[in-house]
Image (tube, rainbow, N blue to C red):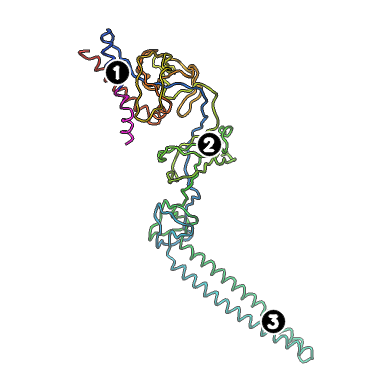
Amino acid sequence: MKKRRVHHILYPICVALLVLGCSGGSNDARNGRNQLIPALEAVQARHGSLPLIERLSGAVRARNQVEIFAEINAIVKKVHVQNGDEVDQGQPLISLRDKEFQERLNQARAAHQIAEAQARQADAKLKEIEAELRRTRALGEKGLTSEAELETIETQAVSAQADVALAKARVEQALATVAEREEVLSQTVIRAPVAGVIGNRNAEIGMTVGPGTRLVTLGQLDSVRVEIILTDRMLSYIEAGQRTEIRAAHIPSGIMSAYLSRISPFLHPVTHSTEAEIDMANPGHYLKSGMFVTVDIYYGESEQATLIPLSALYENPLTGGTGVYVCRDSLNRIPVEPSDVGKTSNLTEPLPFEFVPIDVIAKGRMSAGISGVEPGDWVVTIGQDLFGGESGQAKVRPVDWAWVEHLQNLQRENLLQEIRKKQRAAGSDSTGPGI
C-alpha cells in the first residue's frame, strides 16, 4: 500500500519531467543544441538553529516485568493462561499436582494433634504432682512426713514442669510444620503477583518443573520502560528531564515522545558506561517488551545558521566538495502555497542555477545548518544530478518545507532513482532519429 501511495504522490512529478524533457529537446534541436531543460524542486533556505540530538538504541521493558518460576518440584497439572492473556493480581496461572503435598500436610496436622494431646497429658500429670506436693508439705509442717519424702515429691514436680514445657514446645513445632506444609501446598497454585499481560509461556501439562524452571513472563504494557546506555562522555550534556523521541516501525505515527526519567550514578568499571531509563505511556501496546527502538535525546540547540533540508546537500562529482544548487533569480516573486500530499504546483520558466560550496555546521534529523548560503535563497532539493556541471538552467517547482520533509520521510532516495531512470529514458527518446 505504501509503495502505491508514494508512486501516486510523485507520479505528476515524473510526468512533468518526461514532458519537459521531450519538449525541451525539440526546442534545443531547432537551436542546434542537444540539451534538456530539467524540472526540479526547490525550497527557500531559512535562518534558525538546529536541535542537538544524541541518537541511541534502546530496549523496551514492561512495567513490573517479572519472570515467574516454580518454587517447588512438581508436575504441571493445569495451565490456566495463554500468551497475550491479561490477568489480575492473585489470579491462578498454573496448577501443579498437589496430592503428595496434601498428604504431607495431613501428616503434619495429625502430628500436631498428637503433640497437643501429649501436652494436655503432661499438664494433667503436673497438676497431679503439684497437688501431692501441697499435701506433703502440709503433713511436713505437722511432722507427719519425712524430709526425704518431701524432696522426692519436689523433684517429681520439677520434672513434670519440664515435661509440660517440652510438650508445649512440641506443639509449637508441630504448628510450624503444619504452617510450612500449608505454604508448600499453596505453592502448587502459581498466582500472578501483579496484574499484567502473559508472555513467554513455558509450561505444559505433564512436565516436571522446579525452582529453576521459568514458567511465564508477566508485565504491564500500559506503560513501559525504555533502557538506554550512556557513556561517561554523554553525561556531560545529557541529564534527567530532557525530551526524548522514541522511534519504531510498530508505532502508527512512527514517533512517541517522553522525558528521560533517571540516570544511574554508578558507571561500569570496565566500559565506563551507565544505564538510563525512560518511563512512558504505551497506549495501544504498540511497544512490546524486548523490542529494540531508536531513541533521540534532545539536549540543546546549535548556533544560529542558514538551514536547508538534508535532501538539498549534494556532493559535486567533479570536485568532491559538498554544496547546494542555488537560484538567485526572480524565484522569490513566486508565491508558494502549503503543499498537500499529491498536490502539484506550476513550473517556472527556465531559471539559472549555480553550484555553491558550503560548510556544514550541524546536522539534524531533517535539516542541516550551513554557511555559504543566505537565508531566503532557493536551493534544489530534488534533481541536482540533472545539471551535470557547476551551473545550468532548470524549470522549478517551488515547494514548502512541509513537502520536503514529507518526501524525506518516504525514503526519498529510492524514489529519486525511479525519477532519474525515467528522465534518462526521456533523454534517449528525445535524441533518437527524427529529433
Percent position of residue 381, x then y: 40, 22
Q: Amino acid at mark 3?
A: Ala
Of labels 2 and 3, earlier in sequence is 3
Image point 52% across, 65% down: which residue?
A: 183
Residue 11 within the magenta-colored segment of the rendering: yes
| 419 up-or-down from 142: above or below | above
| 9 up-or-down from 350: above or below | below
Percent position of residue 304, x then y: 54, 23
Percent position of residue 23, x then y: 27, 16
Residue found farthest to the bottom:
144
Estimate the spatial distance between the alpha carbons at disc 2 and disc 3, rounded to whole Å. 80 Å
Q: Amino acid at mark 1?
A: Leu
Q: Secondary structure at mark 1?
A: helix
| 201 up-or-down from 339: above or below | below
Image point 57% across, 36% down: which residue?
A: 239
Image point 44% across, 15% down: which residue?
A: 356
Q: How many marks?
A: 3
Q: Amino acid at mark 2?
A: Arg
Residue sitting nearer the eye, 6 or 55: 6
Estimate the spatial distance between the alpha carbons at disc 2 and disc 1, rounded to whole Å. 46 Å
What residue is pinned by disc 1?
A: 20
What residue is pinned by disc 2?
A: 243
Disc 3 residue crowd, few under 14, some 14–19, many 20+, Cα 10 Å? many
Q: Secondary structure at mark 3?
A: helix
